[in-house]
Image (tube, rainbow, N blue to C red):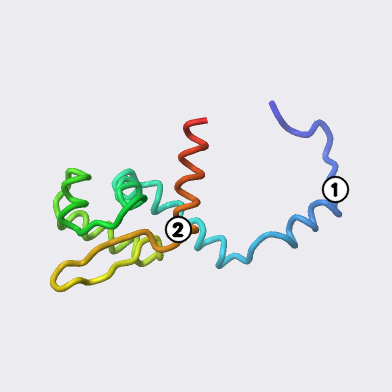
Amino acid sequence: MNVCGEKCINEVSVNKTIKNLPDPKTIVGMAEIFKALSDPSRLKIVLALLKQEHCVCDIAVICNQTESAISHQLRVLRSLKIVKNRREGKIVYYTLADDHVIFLIHYSLDHVKH
């Protein structure tokens, strides 16, 4: 069992770590992003958008889901600023929101493949 054999709290170290933790609101925001990306359907959408933008119809075919189901998942991802959209006439195209999301996805892909 990996527990301390003796209770010995390093107050300096603990206080330094506590001081460097993000505020609770930021931690909750981070958890929401990871929770959204932990859903296989949403993750597949994000992976589909990694190299190029797609409309809902394209994403539905790529993910083998209905357009309605994809639209629902895209709303979740948009609300968390993971994806963004642009309108071209009657068609709405989706892409990843920014380089932070792209980096996070690439980094996790590298980690899993390693």
> What residue type is disc 2 on?
Glu
Residue at image position (30%, 48%) is 48
Front position among marks 2 and 1: 2
Work out whether 84 lies above or below 40: below
Estimate the x, y position of residue 106 in percent, counting from the top left.
47, 45
Label 1: few (<14), some (14–19) or many (≥20) C-alpha neighbours in 10 Å? few
Q: Position of residue 41 (x, y in %)?
A: 29, 46
Front residue of this view, candidates 102 and 33 = 102
Q: Do the CB atoms of the residues marked 2 and 1 lie less than 8 Å apart?
A: no
**Against 1, is 66 above or below?**
below
Which residue is rendered at x = 52% and y = 61% of the image? 28
Above or below: residue 75 compared with residue 4: below
Q: Is residue 20 left or right of residue 103?
A: right
Secondary element type, mark 2: helix
- Dividing the picture into quarters, in which one does residue 6 lie? top right
Disc 2: which residue:
32
Instruction: Compare marks 2 and 1 and give the one earlier in the sequence.
Output: 1
Q: Quadrant of the N terminus?
A: top right
Kindly identify the amino acid type of the residue bearing the numbered disc 1: Asn
> Residue at left 49%, top 42%?
108
Residue 56 image position (x, y, % from top left): 19, 58
Residue drawn 28% across the image and 57% down it:
53
Name, please, the residue furthest toward the top. Answer: 1
Nearest the viewer among 94 and 39 is 94
In the image, is 91 to the left or to the right of 28? left
Q: Secondary structure at mark 1?
A: loop
Query: Badge 2, how many Cα within 10 Å: few under 14, some, many 20+?
Result: few
Tell whether 13 sits left or right of 42. right
From the image, tell me which residue sits under label 1: 10
Disc assigned to residue 103: none
Q: Is residue 113 above or below residue 83?
A: above
Q: CA distance from mark 2 to mark 1?
A: 31 Å
